[in-house]
Image: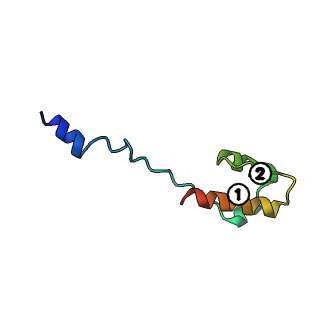
Amino acid sequence: MWSWLEKIFLGDLTNGWKEKPLVLVPSKAEMKKMTKKDLEKMGRKHKLELDRRLTKDKLVNQLHKHMKNLNK
């Protein structure tokens, strides 16, 4: 009899209340130490396709901005 009350008030806390996991964003200085291929792999991991024909600075800026926006 009380089980339905428990479901109403306590419920399954993960049902409908799923929080996005926070993404650890490396600093731009750390990203600049990586190769273009490593940046591309990291971008794909976070669902961002980077064009390696661009300069490394542009890749770092795009990836850093994208990863920061994932935490919002």
Q: In the image, which disc is placed on residue 50?
A: 2
Q: Quadrant of the N terminus?
A: top left
Q: Residue 55, image x and y in percent?
A: 85, 60
Q: Which residue is mark 1?
A: 63
User: What is the x, y in percent for residue 44?
Assistant: 70, 45
Nearest the camera: 10 or 57? 10
Q: Nearer the viewer, residue 5 or 54?
A: 5
Extreme-right residue of the structure:
53
Return the residue found at the far left.
Answer: 1
Image check: 11 left or right of 43?
A: left
**Residue at 39% across, 44% down:** 16
Nearest the camera: 60 or 35? 60
Q: Dot 2: few (<14), some (14–19), or many (≥20) neighbours within 10 Å? A: many
Residue drawn at the location 63% of the way across and 57% of the way down = 67
Determine whether label 1 and label 2 are within 8 Å by CB. yes
Q: Quadrant of the C terminus?
A: bottom right
Q: As drawn, is 45 to the left or to the right of 17?
A: right
Tell me the amino acid under the disc marked 2.
Leu
User: What mark, if any, has residue 32 been given in the picture?
Assistant: none
Q: How many discs appear?
A: 2
Residue at the extreme top: 1
- Crowding at dot 1, Cα within 10 Å, few <14 / some 14-19 / many 20+, comes out as many
Nearer to the camera, 16 or 53: 16
Task: Judge whether 6 appears above or below 27 on screen.
Answer: above
